Amino acid sequence: MPTVRSLGWSSMTVFANPVLPGMYPDPSVCRVGDTFYLANSSFEYFPGLPLHSSTDLVTWTPLGHAIDRTGQAGLLDLAGVPDSGGLYAPTLRHHDGLFFLACTVVGGAADASFFLTTTDPAGPWSDPVFLEGARGIDPTVFFHEGRVWWAGCRLVEPGAYPGQTEIWLRELDPVAGRLFGQEHILWNGAVAGAVWAEGPHLFAHDGWIYLLAAEGGTERNHAVSVARSRSVTGPYVGNPGNPILSHRQLGATASVQNVGHADLVEAGDGSWWALALGVRSRAGGHVLGRETFLAPVAWESGWPVVNPGAGRLGERGSTPFTSADAPTPAELHDTFPVGPLAAHWLGVRGPVPGAHTSAAELHLEPPAPPAPDPAGSTSAPRPATRTPAAFLGYRLRHPDVRAGLRLVLPYPGVTAGLALRQSENFGLRIELAHAPAGWTATAIARADGADTVLGSVPLDPVAPGSLLDLTAELSAAGVAFTVTVAGETRVVAVTDAALLTTERAGGFVGTVVGPFVSGEPGHPVTVTGFDYVPTASATP
């Protein structure tokens, strides 16, 4: 557990939103003593369900991931999920010395809700406990007056309109790992006709039970609404002032959009706070994904008011708490020290086979082609890829940044490079490949599953064992790819970043950047360093 300090109003911490930049969507928060704990969605990436701690709600220290073992990933069938499938919208709670994490895996052999437990959020976490009858997504767990309740969101069948959902509730036996008792339908959301009332969270405050929900879909019309009841099982009545948080009314030019999916937490001094997702938009799109933002909450006439006097997320603010933790550096210079691969590296749908460090180097080996499914197999189809590739991704956390890697010239039968991955079907990359005419550095755009060459630079003569630098620089002007050999830097291509935006590619994730290799198995590529440097400022 991290060291904690007493909360008080004698000092404060100033923050700039987002407080957790990069692809950290669907925040869920709880407090134990003076320490706050945060969990986020991870979708198809592994390790999954990242966890952070903080003593000031601003400085978030990584603790690791709840899903970090191959056995857990296998039980969840992450290998079978599509892009933007996988681990959706967790809820993190603490009760009687035990942390509970409720979640859903979407898009595998079957959608399934589950929970994990631990005494230490830094892990290890238990294997997933699946709940029969827990249909839908975005589950939450609520401890109240000696009973444990499980709520989730699912489509109404048949619905009054497409996308109509209902939030349902049953009692949970956490020891036996089963739901029991009568099912209760709690709410359909605040606005008739609004889609996807989802992401429910339950709170007890001042004799009321409050139900917080996202609404409107996780895009421009996203919002946060709230209802309350004197009983956990309802009936729930919506706040006349709903939605209590949204940026949809600000229009297409707002710098922060898609705001919703909030969780509330009470601090030790009695103040309340909201953590919500939002996106930073530039030129009509966002490439970083949905990020975690912070806002104060006041109670007025029995209802929560987010950021009183403003009603929307502020660019800056302060909390009346001091931090016991050092802020995460804006820059990363990874020289791959010997030992386990750092937790900031993400694989797609599971750990990357053959990725290991040795003598301060990363060795990344092209994977073998996947075996065909047996004839007559009824298992869920595996996601298609352009070619089998090993890839490690680091979350983009800044809109203006330079990311680069240094690698040893690969074996002629291997292609290696630096990729900006949005999904299997959308992304940008620069790669080294050998053809009859010699080595080239080529920049490639992938859109709708098809590759287009943006530019190519011949590299020969280049000697075996040479070190090369591949760099991608993201800015308002787009993405510039360069290659450096023997101290000479050459521009390979400059393109816009539209293919990296959710608005173009779809889905729910942000962009990750890192090394990839493909080609003949048995010929690992050596990467000697990866650098991530914000180019506009060191703040989000």
Image: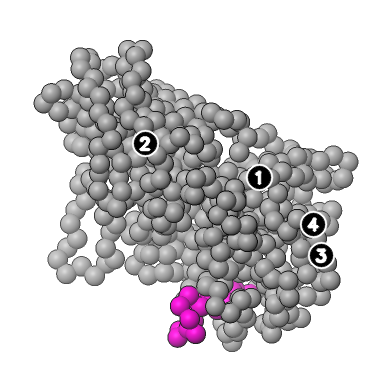
Horizontal and vertical percent for residue 120? 62, 51
Question: Dividing the picture into quarters, in which one does residue 185 lie?
Answer: bottom right
Q: Earlier in the sequence, mark 2 or mark 1?
A: 1
| Amino acid bearing label 4 | Gly
| Amino acid bearing label 2 | Thr
Element on which disc 4 rests: loop
Q: Which of 106/275 is in front?
A: 275
Q: Quadrant of the N terminus?
A: top right
Residue 504 at least partly seen:
yes
Residue 40 at least partly seen:
no
Instruction: Return the residue at label 2.
Output: 495
Q: Which of 540/256 is in front?
A: 256
Horizontal and vertical percent for residue 187? 62, 79
Q: Earlier in the sequence, mark 3 or mark 1?
A: 1
Instruction: Return the residue at label 1.
Output: 17
Mark 2–mark 1 distance (CA, rounded to whole Å): 28 Å
Q: Quadrant of the C terminus?
A: top right
Instruction: Return the residue at label 4.
Output: 309
